[in-house]
Amino acid sequence: MTLLDRFQRRITYLRLSVTDRCDLRCTYCMPERQTFLPRAEVLSLEELHRLALGFIARGVTRIRLTGGEPLVRRDMIELVRALGRKLGDGLDELTLTTNGTQLARFADDLAAAGVRRINVSLDTLDRGRFAELARRDELPRVLEGIAAAQAAGLQVKINTVALKGVNDGEIPVLMEWAHGRGMDLTLIEVMPLGEVEADRFDQYLPLSEVRANLEQRYRLTPSGHRTGGPARYLDVAETGGRLGLITPLTGNFCDGCNRVRVTTTGTLHPCLGGTEAVDLRTALRSDDPDTALERALDRAMAIKPERHHFAIGARGQAPALARHMSATGG
Ligand code: SAM
Ligand code: SF4
C-alpha cells in the first residue's frame, strides 16, 4: 500500500540521514562545539538498508542520503551500492546532499553505483569567507570535489543558503560561476532550526528581496522545471541557466509536500518544521521488523501535519525547533 497522508499527499520521497557528524561547522547549521550522537544510537548499515527497502516497498521512488555530512560515514559507499541495486526495481532515483569535501575521493564510486545527480552546498566562493562561515578552511577541497563529480559524469546542483550581510553581495557571482559550469544554483532561506551562536534574525535574508535585487540585472522568467523537491525555478536569460528558490519563510510550499525525513537514529520526522516523530529503530530491532515498520509508517502518515509554522519575526526569538538541520537531515 502506498503512503498517503491525511491531506491526500502521496509520500514518494525519503530523505535519509546517515550520520549527524560533519567535518565542517557552518555557523547557520550547528555550533562549533556540537555534541554528536554516541555510535550505538546510530542505525547500522544493515538497518539503514532494511529501512530504505521498507520505504521502497511502500511506494517511495526517490531517496536522498544526507546528514550531517553523508560522506564522512565510513560504510556510506556500501549503502549507496546496496541501494543502487534497487534502481529500476522500485527506486527511480538515488541522490545525495553533500558539502563536497570528500567528493574527490568518492565521485567515481557514486557514479558507478548509479547516482546521477547530487546537490553540493556552497555558500561562498571567497576562501576567507568560507573559512569563517564553515569554520574550516576547506574551499579548495570543495571546489576540487565539485570538479571531480562533474568529471565522473554526475550532474551537480549547487545549494546556497542566503545569509544577510554574509553572502548577499555574492549571489550574482555564485550564480554566474555555477551557470558557467553547467550547474543550477538553488538559494535557500535560513530556517530557525536549533541553537547556533548567531541570532537567526540577523542571518535571515528573505528570497523575495534577493529576487527583486537580481531582477535589476537579470531577466528572470518562471521555468516549468521541477526536481521533485520544494524548489521553484526561474530561467535566467543572461546566463542561460536556472535559479532555484526554496522559500520556507516567504512562500510556503507544504501543499505539495511529498517527503518525510528519517534521522540517523531511525526517528521519522514527517515534517522538517514539526515536533511529530515516529520511532522506526524499535520497529527495526523488533522480532518482526517488516510488519513493525509497516505499522510505524502508517502511524507517520496519520500524524503528518498540514504545514510547518516556523517564522523569523524578531531578534532574540528562540528557535522554532531545538533540532538542528544536521540532526534531522537537510
Ligand atoms: N552536510 C551536507 C551539506 O551541507 O550539504 C548535508 C546536510 S546539510 C544539513 C543540508 C543542507 O541544509 C545544506 O544545504 C545546508 O546549507 C542546509 N542548512 C543547514 N542548516 C540550515 C538552516 N538552519 N536553514 C536553512 N538551511 C540549512
Ligand atoms: Fe555540516 Fe552541512 Fe551543517 Fe555545514 S550545513 S555544518 S556541511 S551538515
Image (tube, rainbow, N blue to C red):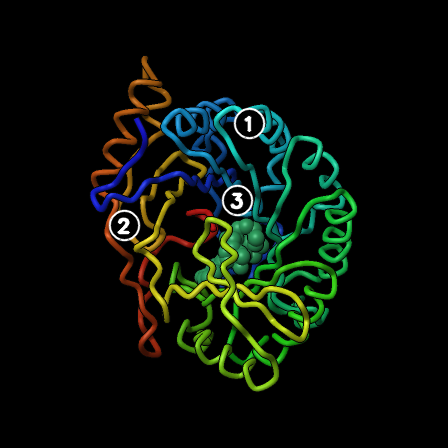
- Is ligand 1 closer than 8 angstroms to the Cβ of mark 2? no
Q: Which residue is mark 3?
A: 66
Q: Is residue 242 above or below residue 284?
A: below
Q: Secondary structure at mark 1?
A: loop
Q: Which residue is mark 2?
A: 275
Query: In the image, residue 141 lies at what x, y percent?
Result: 75, 55
Q: Which of the 4 image quadrants contains residue 109?
A: top right
- Which residue sits furthest bottom? 216
Residue 33 visible to an observer of this rendering:
no
- Mark 2 touches mark 1? (CB < 8 Å): no
**Left or right: 224 as drawn, with respect to 257:** right
Whichever of callouts 2 and 1 sits on the residue coming sooner in the sequence is 1
Q: Secondary structure at mark 2?
A: loop
Q: Which residue is drawn at the image coordinates 31% and 44% (left, top)?
A: 270
Q: Residues within 10 Å of mark 1 (few under 14, many from 20)?
A: few
Q: Residues within 10 Å of mark 2 (few under 14, many from 20)?
A: some
**Residue type at the position of mark 2:** Thr
Q: Which residue is mark 1?
A: 88
- Is ligand 1 closer than 8 angstroms to the Cβ of mark 3? yes
